[in-house]
Amino acid sequence: MALAQERPTVVEPASGTGLAGFEQSDRKLRRTMGLTQLTALSLGAIIGSGWLFAVLSADATAGPASMVSWIIGGICVLFIALTYMEIAGMLPRTGALARYPQLTHGGYAGMLLGWAYLLSAVSVPAIEAEASVTYLSSKFPNIGLIPPKSTILAWPKGVMLAFGFLLLFFFLNFFGIRLLSEVNRWVVAWKLIIPTLTFCFVFAAFRGSNYGSSVGGFAPLGKAPIFEAVSTTGIVFAYLGFRQALEYAGEARRPQRDVPRATILSVLIAIVLYVLLQVAFTGGIRWGSLGVKIGDWKALSTSAWATGPFYRELHAAGIGALAGFAALLIWDAVISPAGTGWVYTGTSTRTFYGMSVQRLFPPGLQVMNRFGIPWAALIASFFVGGLFFIRQPSWYGIVGFITSTTVLTYIMGGSGVAVLRRIAPDWHRPVRLPAMWVLSALGFIAATEVVYWSGFSTLITVMTAAFFAFVIYLWYYAPSRGYMTQGQGVTLGFAFLGVWLYIAAKGGWVLRTGTLPVHGSWTEGTYYVAFAAAVVLVSAATWLLSNEEGRKQIDRAWWLIFLILSLLLLSYYGEYGFNSTHPTVAFPYSDLIAAGIGLIAFLWSVHSGYETEELREMRRAIESSRMEAVPGTGPTLSSEGRPEHAAG
């Protein structure tokens, strides 16, 4: 078998700086993936649990206009994906999205965004496992939910079954990228066939009246919920798999050509498929089967259909052939989420790996097994991902958090391409983004809007989780780089950790499982002021204790702190806060202000970008290889701009 013929790879983690560390680390990874495999990886991650659940959640939020939400979400993701085309071709790196922020803005911004991205990546396998168990409960109601027919996993039966899926994802990744690619190829074919057939079968039970005046018209809940649905219902979450081609770029044969193509192609296919599925689902609703009043769209989220929307809908149609196909959906509820789960297990593994290469995490996370997989990072991914079962054992409860933490990191696509054009204009770019300033700004603003649409309840959780990154920065990164002494870093890190825990506990947001803080907590305004003050003060204290290079890291990250805190404040007073019925800043003005905040942050971030230590090392390595190249003997530049030895 092919696996038995693979030779062991070097297992030592990269050490040092420059080509021996930062550049050489990716050379241990095997370059075996082509355009088809990269596209399949992205599609395999895109088509997961999103289409199975988000159709109902989107209808509950926006009514029939939810089809517009899918289009808006797809366009936003496409703008974001476009900004990464140039960077991915120019700097193909495994764990790319966690590594790009540090390359252009230093370790402080890099740690914050890398940590947010890591949280989103490790939680996806957990939500996909939750999705499989939840959908299975439609057929097997005693499988392990609290109570049966709810959407929350019960302990021990439901949670342990979900952990079983995590173990499956673990082992599929442990035995190498070749096994993952081969298995994923067949799973992606299934993933494309089943949703397409679902769309066709559901259309057989289509009722045009579900788009008419009897249910409140096309947008019965108003215009603002159309945008809210993009972030909160799983729509953008369903598109997020486009990044897989970027994440596996270090293992692609021709990354400059294939990575951008695979990224864009996967998003376009998904937009068409998802819009058709949403239109079909909305038209196939049977209000009598739901047990709710006709036109009561909000009641969909707590109806009997919530555990398995398409499965329930096909059964309710009363057509024998449709009910027979519904049984096949139960199998798909295992295969589609599982296919996404094992791809994202690899993604989170490579995120740990990439942050280790950046020296944001210890080098031990780069250790490879004989199949070329960073096994230490894989184990870390498995255990950290499992923690999300404790915090929120429900698909609907965690989807907004994953969306916001992920898209928050996507702002770096627009910023990064503009910064690299300014500080590295002479570097080889296989793909150049046309109308760069327009598209990069649009990509940045699109990401900003998606984060804002998540709403205050989700954003405050994201802020709490994301700023924990400062503890890791102070304990490990800053002392390891010599920006401050170990004693200073540990002391300040423990001080911030204590404040972080106290404020989070008083705010009622620690390990909560509902949409509201626990009884007796601080008000939302008090919580925001306290946390914002803590973030600004710890950043100022870190600046004072750091040397010149360390201070530069913080100076180049203030735009990011401004963006997060400003969006959260606007969300509190805006259309998507707790006072959404009578907001201080109503739609569309709140969305326009969010766009303005995004534009300010974009321009500030581009101005803040600089040639970091990592970029300088990369430049020196490439320039050195050019000077020393001797035909037939010395190092030459590969098509990727990397030094490699010519054959003797």
Image: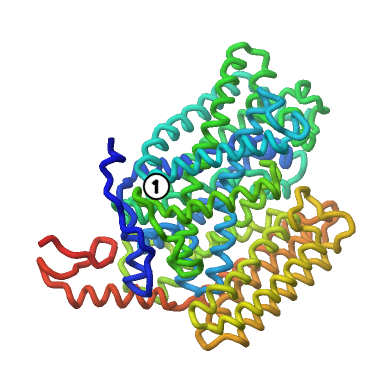
Q: Is residue 509 left or right of residue 164?
A: right
Nearer the observer, 421 or 186: 186
Res 220 → quadrant:
top right
* Residue located 61% across and 32% down the image: 279
Q: Does 17 appear above or below 448?
A: below
- Give the percent coordinates (x, y) of residue 24: 32, 66
Nearer the observer, 157 or 108: 157
Q: Is residue 275 left or right of residue 266?
A: right
Q: Which residue is mark 1?
A: 262
Name the amino acid, label 1. Answer: Ala
- Give the percent coordinates (x, y) of residue 343: 47, 44
Question: Which residue is the extreme one toward the right?
Answer: 520
Per the image, label 1 sits on a secondary structure element best described as helix
* Residue located 21% across and 74% down the image: 626
Nearer the observer, 111 or 505: 505
Quadrant of image for the C terminus: bottom left
- Give the percent coordinates (x, y) of residue 555: 57, 81
Q: Does 609 appear above or below 516?
A: below
Res 363 → quadrant:
bottom left
Q: Does 302 appear above or below 99?
A: above
Nearer the observer, 286 or 171: 171
* Residue located 57% across and 63% down the image: 115
Quadrant of image for the N terminus: top left
Q: Does 575 appear above or below 284?
A: below
